[in-house]
Amino acid sequence: MIRIDVLSVFRGEGGEGGEGDEHGKGGNLLGVVLDGASVPGSERRQELAAELGFSETVFVDDAERGVVDIRTPSVRLPFAGHPLIGVASLLPGVDVLRPPAGEVPVRRDGDLIRIAGRPEWASGRRMERYASVAEVDALPAPPPGEGWLYAWAWEDEAAGRVRARAFPRRGDAIVEDEATGAAALVLTAELGRALDIRQGVGSRIVTRPLPDGTIEVGGRAEMVERRVV
């Protein structure tokens, strides 16, 4: 028996809604297997992640130390923002998570959970600036081309507000990623300033550079359902 907690991560604070989001709050679905031992072996974990079809599924291998294993439907990731924020919401006593990339500090700020990571942990994601929010909104899913694309435009440059959409383009079932902490981290590092990002149909990601060279990424996480397979 495998228990899977399904969370919505990077939830916004309301809006007019959109496809796949009747509440208008966005949020990227995440599968969390708190008992990682219930899914032994890399092959079976990858199969389960593909079966679930979420952008990422995370397996907790040591809850006390925060050791986690992150999978997309097709690959294992060394680091990803939305799985780590989701797991942190389920492990309230853990202040450091340990994905393959390294130690990730966790900070809780009201209903926001904030993690910090290094830009090099999220390499391979290309940032492309567009002239307007309308141009970003008009992009097909996915746009022509190859490789991981983060399309963005200033919504209000002075205020640091950004409109973004994410297209993994890696050949699996994830055509567009509703909310992506790793890509937001890379964009923040490139721009060198705090950002308030509206991504997908209504997700919200807040970021800021820290003095030690890491980037803090924050968002809300809410439980959606529990499954047993």
Image (cartoon, helix red, strand yellow):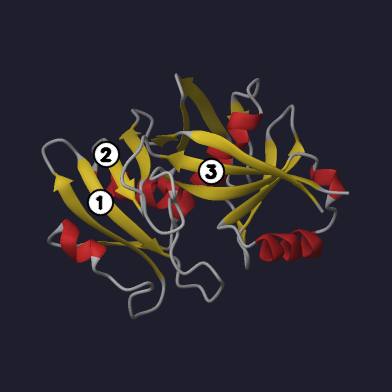
Q: Which mark is residue 8?
A: 3
**Residue drawn at the location 38% of the way across and 45% of the way down:** 24
Looking at the image, residue 59 sits to the left or right of residue 203; the answer is right
User: Where in the figure is residue 131, as x and y percent of width and height?
Assistant: 12, 61
In the displayed structure, 50 sits above or below 2; it is below
Q: Which mark is residue 163?
A: 1
Q: Nearer the viewer, mark 2 or mark 3?
A: 3
Looking at the image, residue 76 sits to the left or right of residue 29; the answer is right
Secondary structure beneath label 3: strand
Q: Nearer the viewer, residue 189 or 143?
A: 143
- Work out how far the residue at label 3 is from the one at label 1, CA to CA, in angstroms: 20 Å
Looking at the image, residue 153 sits to the left or right of residue 2; the answer is left
In the displayed structure, 210 sits above or below 34; it is above
User: Where in the figure is residue 187, as x and y percent of width and height?
Assistant: 31, 50
Secondary structure beneath label 1: strand
- Work out how far the residue at label 1 is from the one at label 2, CA to CA, in angstroms: 10 Å
Q: Dot 2 corresponds to which residue?
A: 195
Image quarter where the C terminus lies is bottom right
Q: Nearer the viewer, mark 3 or mark 1?
A: 3
Question: Could you tell me the amino acid type at mark 3?
Answer: Ser
